[in-house]
Image: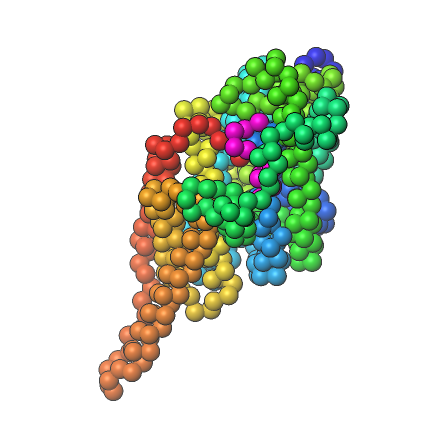
Amino acid sequence: MNGLDVFVVVSYLVGLLLLGYALRQQQNEKDYYLAGRTISWAPLTLSTMATQLSAISFISAPAFVGLREDGGLKWLSYELALPLAMILLIFVVTPALYRAGAVSIYSYLERRFDLRTRLLVSLSFQVVRSFSTGIMVYAMALILDAVLGISHWQAIFWVGVITLLYASTGGMRAVVYGDALQMILIFIGLLLVGAYALASAGSLGTALEGVASERLIAINFSALGLNGDGFGFWPMLIGGVVLYASYYGCDQSEAQRILSARSLRDAQKLLLANGLLRFPLVLLYCLVGLLVGYVAQNDSSLLARIPTDKPDYLMPLFIIEYLPHGAIGLLLVAILSAAMSSLSSAVNSLSAATLSDLESIGVKPNNPSAQLTWARATSLLWGVAILITSLFAGAIAPTVIEAINKVGSALFGPILGVFLLAIGSKRTSSLAASAGLLTGATVNLGLWKFQPQLFWMWWNVTGLLTCLAVAYAITLLAHTNVEAAGRQRPGEPHQPNQRAPTSYAVFLLIAFAIILLTSLSAESWALGGLALH
């Protein structure tokens, strides 16, 4: 990097701070977390895409397609299920959550079930999202340290401080408009890298002819994901519908965009736009990966600098070797943008879930001014916690980064099941929903440990079906008991149903924490290499 690159980066970071300062005027908690429900669908669409397409995607997706062993265009199979998942969200999940009018989507579960179910699902979100975001920041800083000479702690410090300042000051408006700008920068960055890679390759046809034929296979109908074969059409389609529906509709970090839309129609538009626009963008990721991978394979000096077990160095090294100064700074901004988008969304959504949970148990600020103070304070606290995690993640990142993705798949299905029960079943009780969630997660962990040949995308399906089956079985049993109680002997007093004791909530939370710790420990025994996603 030279002075021009540094100027580009510093100008961008200063611009973000000014954006946060300009959007600092919030009136209350809902204004801070949902921007007063005044944002249109277009910036919300870009924000949603930027949050999901993190720095790891910007770096790792092209590396997977162009260089990683057993990689290739099968990365596109991740997108097979997205349109179907968007249909489910548009017509089933989104109307119920948006009309509830709450800051946290988990408040809906409390209204439908009770506080225990709400806290159980909210806690699962907070644990997984904070941990995975910390690992994402660590991985981004590690790569910048290795290829650009920016020290690990400096990258974390500057990305973290700038992000926390503009996100905590400007609230959801700053997060959304910052994300929209970052998504545009990511797109421009991909086009720049693709253009220089194409110029180096000569033509797209030349690059495609020089790429191994197996890398050009996008869909594999023969791989069913049952015998150690992953990335097949059916597991990616069926499991992907559950994964994406749960992630976009039942995860606070994404669903908060739905709640921030100025109308239900705008919320549905942003989901429709996301379903239509994501595939072209991911296709661009893949094409850029093929081009950059082809260039690297024919440039021995560049290829020698990429560790054989870390193909994710491909993109950053190509940028500093093949792009001119100024463009290098812009591409560094794109990488930083992707990381900052994920971090800003995480701290805002984690703060919303935490503060809403505290209010549900009676810990409430006294007035709108105090609400804003609490909101900003919890955002900063979550940000500091994530950055501390990323600073000390070196000992666990080489194995746990893939474990985080698997924990997500172990939980996405059961969590979607709880929301579907809340929306579509009036007879299901809190006990039935919570038991379904825990049983679904436990079954998936059993598959994880004892059936490693089953592709983990299927866990989304097994978790959902187990959750629904257990919840309906308990509901049917409870209904049968109520009918039996109604046929009591004449003169026998009726005994009303008793609520579970308060300690039941503590038991559920402890059980869930044990499930998470067990899953992470099990994966640390099994995994051996860094798998960024």
Q: Residue at x 42, y 30 (%)?
A: 399
Q: Is residue 488 visible?
A: yes
Check the image and report above or below for 500 versus 119: below
Q: Is residue 463 magenta?
A: no
Looking at this view, is 55 or 376 the one in front? 55
Q: Residue at x 51, y 26 (%)?
A: 138
Q: Is residue 91 left or right of residue 484?
A: right
Q: Residue at x 60, y 30 (%)?
A: 212
Percent across and percent down for residue 385 are 47, 32
Check the image and report above or below for 423 versus 323: below
**Residue 302, located in which quarter of the rendered image?**
top right
Identify the image quadrant of the N terminus.
Answer: top right
Coloring basis for residues? rainbow
Looking at this view, is 493 or 337 the one in front? 337
**Residue 454, located in which quarter of the rendered image?**
top left
Looking at this view, is 504 or 522 the one in front? 522
Percent across and percent down for residue 24 are 67, 38
Q: Is residue 506 visible?
A: no
**Residue 337, located in which quarter of the rendered image?**
top right
Q: Is residue 137 left or right of residue 520?
A: right
What segment carries the magenta color? 67-77
Q: Residue at x 63, y 21 (%)?
A: 296
Looking at this view, is 152 or 450 the one in front? 450
Q: Is residue 431 left or right of residue 8?
A: left
Q: Is residue 76 magenta?
A: yes
Q: Is residue 237 left or right of residue 431?
A: right
Percent across and percent down for residue 285 are 65, 34
Percent across and percent down for residue 397 are 45, 28
